[in-house]
Amino acid sequence: MYHVGCQYSSVSASVESFRACTSKVAIMLALNLLVFTIGAICACHAKNIVLIVADDLDVVLDGMTPLASTRKYIGDEGVTFKNAFAAVPICCPNRASILTGRYQHNHRTFNNSLNGGCNAQDWLTSHETNTFAAILKHQMNYSTFYAGKYLNQYGDKNTGGASHVPPGWDQWYGLIGNSRYYNYSLSVNGVEKKYGAEPSDYLTDVIKTLALDYISRQRKDHPFMMVLAPPAPHHPFVPAERHNDKYKGTRAKLTKNFNTWTNQEKHWLVRMGPSPLPSNVLASLDEIYRRRWEALLAVDEMVADVHDQLAKQGLLDDTYVIFTSDNGFHVGQFSQPYDKRQPYEADIRVPLLVRGPNVTRATEFAAAVSSVDLFATIIEMAGVEAPSDGISLLKLLRDGVKDRTVLVEYRGERSIGAPSSGCPSDRDLNLSHCSREFACKCQDAANNTFACVRRVAERENNVFCVFNEDEGEFVEAYDLLSDEFQMTNVGPAMGANKRHRFRDRLRKMTNCKGRNCVATNPPLHSHLDELSLLYTSMEDHFVTMI
């Protein structure tokens, strides 16, 4: 609430000071009444929210194919965002973006390591207290539930260990460390619980059981927020036993940019190592591809069972369900074996499906959206507002936005300790995630650092990226209207004026914060903008009255 009151240095305060102060008091009282009224209205209309975040699920390589129930119960009953992009194409930083609504340069979680900000002390003290869970709990008294992967370094003894329960969560079942399917530990409301290798320990199934039990105890008269974060289809790509060999014989998708010859127009990390890949690596990629699909089948069962439990409890009509992933994934594109961390479509595109009250069923939305938008979306679904770098998906739908630019950032990760892959790259600590099994290709490096602006409009579909490499800046740009698979880098041949416009847009977005990060054409206005205009209007009105 806004503070009201007047102070004077002496009894002989001027009439002008008195008039100015009473004007401000009147404005503050009116704003307090407005905020109170809005809060009361929102409390009446707060909805239940279920957010499901898969791990490393692609769109470009048909990753949604095994998720038939997910498409049926969420996509067909709601909206599919056809151009959804990860703000950061890597797990921990993009999960930080989802939780806070901030781009990487604002939440400062740069990669998956503790030194790179993942679940580091700065995250705990400066950002974790401002997640959507903390806001929904403290402002709207939501019942809250989290099960599954949180941040890759969660549970590290240097930042609280398993006893640390992030603010805002009533029921907490956080995975300690990175994705695993068996032989893992959960923090159960701050107490570590170990799971083994029995079929009943399969993590996706454990998450489902916990979720169904939680939903069964919810009431229609009290809103809840739950996040389900299964490990699939992340490495090590382990399906539930019942799903082994369900996709036997399925091979990696042979996109036009699959297993290409060395392309000198790509940044240096992609140019490293053998291109095309040897045949033994290709066989391993086929195995990875099908195992990823098989691991997703348990996720699809979870989605179906959660849907059915919501319907059984009579909660489905008052519940928003959001399905997405923390980042995309490549399998053989540009002769990179498998991973993410690159600015190409396979890595940055993510699935995004939303169903719920007043969401038109079986629709598609074409303009660009970002992971940072999920925070603002959830906040609006709950009936409150909070600052973020994104904008509510519901508002984008209402306003019919057709032209938007979003930001994609990444800061590369070096090896932690002495590598022992057996590759020549072991001598260079700046390289990381190298594997002898996969032709000693390295998936990351300290200077695999880039920022991109990604625009989608009715007549525009492009990306412009700048890499910070040892030899200086390296530009990659693609016109995806004519070059869907990003085979031809148009950056070097781009005219000076056009390049300047792209660079200017990129500079603004890499330094943006809050509303300045929302780049639509034409510009959008938020309720916070309207409140500011209302304040100015009311101030003029009261000054005239006095």
Image: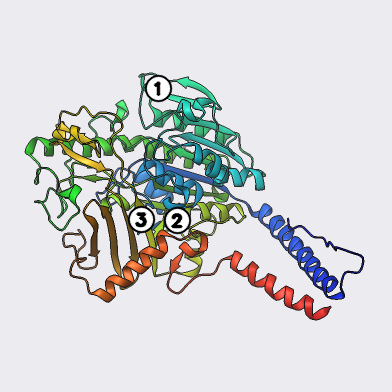
Per the image, label 1 sits on a secondary structure element best described as helix
Q: Which residue is mark 2?
A: 78
Q: Position of residue 47 (x, y in %)?
A: 59, 50
Quick check: can you spot residue 247?
no
Q: Position of residue 139 (x, y in %)?
A: 66, 48
Q: How many residues crowd mark 2 within 10 Å: few (<14), some (14–19), many (20+)?
A: many
Marks 1 and 3, the one that precedes in the sequence: 1
Q: Which residue is mark 3?
A: 408
Q: Position of residue 54 (x, y in %)?
A: 38, 41
Q: Which residue is mark 1?
A: 200
Q: Tell me what residue is drawn at x 32 percent, y 53 percent.
A: 349
Q: Looking at this view, is 141 or 113 the one in front?
A: 113
Quick check: can you spot residue 245?
yes
Marks 2 and 1, the one that precedes in the sequence: 2
Q: How many residues crowd mark 3 within 10 Å: few (<14), some (14–19), many (20+)?
A: many
Mark 1 or 3, closer to the camera:
3
Which residue occupies the extreme right position in the image? 11
**Type of residue at label 1?**
Ser
Per the image, label 3 sits on a secondary structure element best described as strand
Per the image, label 2 sits on a secondary structure element best described as loop
**Type of residue at label 3?**
Val
Q: Tell me what residue is drawn at x 72 percent, y 55 percent.
A: 40
Query: How far apart, in angstroms, are the residues tagged by discs 2 and 3?
Result: 26 Å
Q: Looking at this view, is 118 or 21 the one in front?
A: 21
Marks 2 and 3, the one that precedes in the sequence: 2
**Type of residue at label 2?**
Gly
